[in-house]
Image (spheres, rainbow, N blue to C red):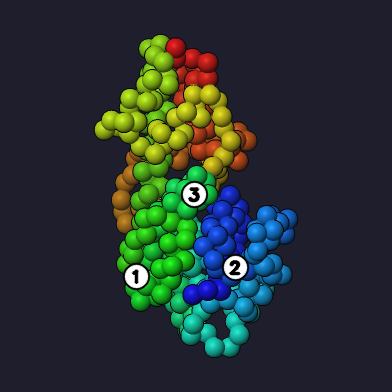
């Protein structure tokens, strides 16, 4: 594949589309806010006026938008990808990098199959750091032969690329990932709370625990931000909250209790209600600060 479309240029999408440009693909982009495409256009990406226009000139269209209804609109809406399909649909592949409901993904794949279009659900993990560096973990669901055709696309944006199974398997794997993100973040906040109350040097505590059995991406990347009070988003509270709603729906359909995940979801909802939804997920630390009556920044040695 040489001609790739990218629809949705948020924190993750812009960086991923940029890495496709760097890898030598002929990239055509669209976003609701055209100004977000300016840097990509400066580096050689083409602009299209709608998802339909993107589909007219590419072999595969990547999508990276917020939620399930947004993906549905981008594909099936008035100016969606289906409206721009140039007739022979056998070669067109839609690669959905969004994080959405697995059941909806399976429904979309079935609807697209009737038009001869293949859908791969390919959510990613690694945050804005991984998106910019091209080191994301990519978890893919769909037909394996289609995955093989698109391997070069995934290799341009990710380091760990895994075929997870049939349609919806990528999204289900991402749901598992988001459980781990949520609980690792809570563990990071609680460990740092104890360190502050014990009067420890937070930098030293983070250094030694990151290298030990308790280490995690959250501890290594978000711990230092919590320590300085930096709430700038690599991934926003409202988006993790949305992802945990997906987890909740899947768990409910399976009759599966997930008490730890539900606790973090409650904390995140309280943050969003309080107006912190667009802060980084490390803003979970605000809840622990308020419960414990302390502050991380400027504390701990």
Q: Residues within 10 Å of mark 1 (few under 14, many from 20)?
A: some
- For the residues labelled 1 and 2, the Cα–Cα distance comes to 27 Å
Q: Position of residue 184 (x, y in %)?
A: 37, 37
- In this rendering, the answer to whether 72 lies above or below 189 is below
Q: Position of residue 210 (x, y in %)?
A: 34, 31
Which structural element holds mark 1? loop
Q: Residues within 10 Å of mark 3 (few under 14, many from 20)?
A: some
Q: Position of residue 31 (x, y in %)?
A: 66, 61
Residue to which mark 2 is pinned: 27
Residue to which mark 1 is pinned: 166
Residue to which mark 3 is pinned: 133
N-terminal of the pair, mark 1 or mark 2, is 2
Residue 18 shown left or right of residue 243 in the figure: right
For residue 59, the mark is: none
N-terminal of the pair, mark 3 or mark 2, is 2
Closest to the observer, 168 or 264: 168
């Amino acid at each position: 594949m040489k001609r790739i479309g990218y629809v949705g240029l948020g924190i993750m999408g812009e960086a991923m589309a940029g890495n496709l440009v760097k890898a030598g693909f002929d990239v055509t982009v669209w976003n609701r806010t055209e100004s977000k495409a300016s840097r990509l256009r400066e580096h050689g990406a083409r602009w299209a006026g709608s998802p339909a226009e993107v589909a007219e000139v590419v072999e595969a269209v990547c999508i990276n938008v917020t939620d399930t209804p947004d993906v549905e609109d981008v594909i099936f809406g008035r100016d969606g990808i289906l409206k721009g399909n140039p007739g022979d649909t056998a070669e067109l592949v839609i690669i959905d990098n969004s994080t959405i409901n697995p059941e909806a993904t399976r429904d979309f794949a079935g609807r697209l199959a009737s038009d001869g279009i293949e859908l791969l659900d390919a959510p990613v993990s690694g945050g804005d750091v991984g998106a910019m560096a091209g080191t994301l973990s990519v978890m893919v669901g769909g037909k394996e032969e289609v995955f093989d055709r698109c391997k070069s696309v995934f290799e341009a944006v990710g380091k760990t690329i895994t075929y997870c199974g049939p349609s919806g398997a990528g999204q289900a794997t991402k749901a598992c990932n988001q459980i781990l993100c949520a609980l690792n973040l809570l563990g990071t906040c609680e460990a740092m709370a104890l360190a502050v109350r014990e009067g420890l040097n937070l930098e030293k505590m983070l250094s030694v625990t990151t290298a030990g059995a308790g280490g995690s991406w959250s501890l290594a990347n978000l711990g230092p931000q919590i320590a300085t009070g930096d709430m700038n988003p690599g991934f926003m509270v409202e988006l993790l909250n949305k992802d945990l709603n997906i987890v909740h729906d899947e768990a409910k359909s399976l009759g599966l209790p997930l008490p730890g995940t539900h606790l973090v979801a409650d904390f995140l909802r309280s943050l969003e209600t309080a107006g912190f939804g667009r802060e980084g997920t490390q803003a979970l630390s605000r809840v622990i600060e308020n419960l414990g009556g302390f502050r991380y920044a400027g504390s701990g040695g």
